[in-house]
Amino acid sequence: MLNIKSLHVTARNFLCFLIMFLMFSYCFVQVHASETDEEETTLSAVLQDGGLLEEETDSGIMAFRMADQGEMERMLVAAVENLQGNIPMREYGMTVSELSTFLIKFLNNHPEYFYLNSSYNYSYDKSSNIVTELRLTYKATAPKVNEMVAAYNSKVEEIISGVNPSWSDLEKALYVNDYLALHCEYDNSHTYHSSYDALIGQKAVCQGYALAFFELMKQLGIPCELVTSDRLNHAWNLVQIGNYWYHVDVTWNDPVEDMCGRARHVYLLKSTKWFRAPSVSNAFPHNATDFVYSGPAGESQASSTAFDNCFWNVVDSAFSYHDGYWYGNYGSTLTKYTGSNGGLNKVDTIAALDKKWPVWGSASQTYSENFSGCCIFGGQLYYAEPNKILSLDLSSPSAEPVLAYELTDREQKMGYIYGFHITKDGILNYGISQSPNSSGVRRETDIHVHTFGAWIVASSGTCLIDGEEYQKCSVCGFQKTRTIPAKGHTPGSGVTCTQAQTCMVCGEVLSQAKGHTPGPEATCTSPQTCMICQEVLAKAKGHTPGTAATCTKDQKCTVCNTVIKRATGHRHTEMKTKAATFSNKGYVKIVCQDCGKTVSNKSINKVKCKKGAAYTVGNYRYKIMSAKTDGKGTVSFAGLEKNVKKVTIGDTVKIMGASFKIVKIEDRALKNRTSITSVTIGKNVHTIGKEAFYKTKSLRTIQIKSTKISKVGTNALKGIHEKAKLKVPKAKLKKYQGLFKNKGQKKTVKIS
């Protein structure tokens, strides 16, 4: 037999189990939906860490919206410059692969962030693959990074300061190529890859050269890209000059065997076709088809061959600029050029360099090439011969060369001068070697004795930060600096409730103000003041007006109930009247102008309409004939108040609110009104009184609309204009011709 109680218990237990199962399932789904994971990765295509560019794929940054890329980049720039570690990322909706591609592009486009590691950690939502947090690391401690960044920025500024604002983009690119070739040495240990290594350490591999060139072009506002080839294991640049893009390989313009003063130009501003193909000048072609570009300009853009066979292909020393002109050693001559985006154009030959370099150990053999080089310092153009450095005064073209330095006897036994360079502070660097293909031994010496002027303050500093002053050589322009020690703060007056104690020199706050000690809160009439200095902290609030005062009721403050404004009484009144009419009563009211209340009201009885009473409506006078005020009453037209030219006697007229028919023109109504020229008579007129228009001598037209006229008084038309016309209804022409006959008018009056 089935036990109903047991069945009930079993059902209840099953229901409880079902509810618990659903709750567990819901919680599991919720936890699973928000489950995150953490990963660490290292980017492989970052140039500053020795990588090469990789082609982007559809799964990378191409899927990430450009607007979001810009916002993400601005955020990341701020984070990196503040050495921020943890960065929330969920709001950007960036996937794991998009983040990797974005960071590669970010690092390669920002050589100035050389201190940012290419390895990073991140958290991401496993269900959506969206990155939720990015964790960056840096290559040094914050103080060290700040020190490196300061040095880097100072060096970039120093290099850019050497650029003349009048230069074309080509001249700027030439200057940067030569600067890097002169000051950076190829790193044969393949350890240094960043722009920091190239500019500060002055030693780097191809990535360092390319990133430094990219950085300096960016600072100069010249479009530039990075180019790499995995097959060549090499990096260089693409730069825009005018409307065309060109390849620039500063690494290959700097001999691997670093030689003092040597800067080549064979790989400067070349087309893609020339870059890949071997030729007489291109001894080391970039013979590969896997070029990858960091920007939108590709190899097809670099199609201009304008500089493929440029004269500078054989110039292996740096060009120098002075007073509007470039100078270089080309074809065994010191040559003067002007510069533009079209190239360097020869202006003049400064000097012939006919001195030959002997082959070491041979009594008769010499090299066909010239190794004189070229460098300008302090307005002097310096060049080399095998055993000496000579100078020419550029301000005196006809001056003879002057000996600037000659190798000592000991140095002459070591070899010849195969390259030199003069630093900005007047130090001559020169290389002594027995072969033009060897860097040999490097030496340095002062090229001249500086003549310094007075110390000039460059920065006065602050109380806590040292200042700086400098002396400038009047010959070469070289500057030496020294520190102006900080003096410390000079305390001003002590602190008060509101006044901090500051330094009397720099204004820096030394002790903060103490702040006020508030007294009782402000009321409607009393302010709140500081219990220490009695300064008003909060003004009296003032009353909060209630309902405005009326003539009979005061206005009070809703907070403290103080009377703000007394009831005024009915002080300002005005009289309002309404004239009585035949059909309505009138009144005289006294009304308060402030509250609108009626103070007194006096009624005026209706006007009684009386036969024979006269009324003026507008300019016309009327006389009551029938005193009915229901619209059936009648009046006669009795005359005018003042002269007019045209008179229109209507069908009806409204007098004292009632309408009356105009049925008659009174005797002599318009007598002697000499200004009238026309009269129109309405449809209800049946009688025209005697002498109605008597001597109205200017009256030329009478327009009669009424068909009811039965009586015209004696001499009604006498004295009107002799050519007057009477216009009557057509149906009444004959009757009216007889009716108006002999009413005083002359025969010339025409009735039609």
Image: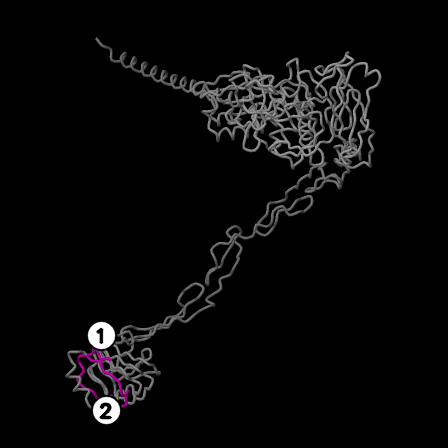
Name the image quarter holding the N terminus: top left
Task: Report the magenta residues as a range.
Answer: 703-728
- Neighbour tally class for label 1: few under 14, some 14-19, many 20 plus, Cα within 10 Å: some
Which color scheme does this rendered protein use? one colour
Q: Which residue is mark 2?
A: 744
- Across and down, in percent, residue 703 comes to 24, 80
Q: Most prominent secondary structure in the magenta stretch?
A: loop
Disc 2 and disc 1: Cα gap in Å? 35 Å
- Across and down, in percent, residue 84 comes to 59, 25
742 left or right, relative to 342: left
551 left or right, relative to 456: left
730 left or right, relative to 155: left
Q: Which residue is mark 1?
A: 631
Q: Quadrant of residue 581?
A: bottom left
Q: Amino acid at mark 2?
A: Gly
- Across and down, in percent, residue 318 comes to 69, 26
Q: Amino acid at mark 1?
A: Gly
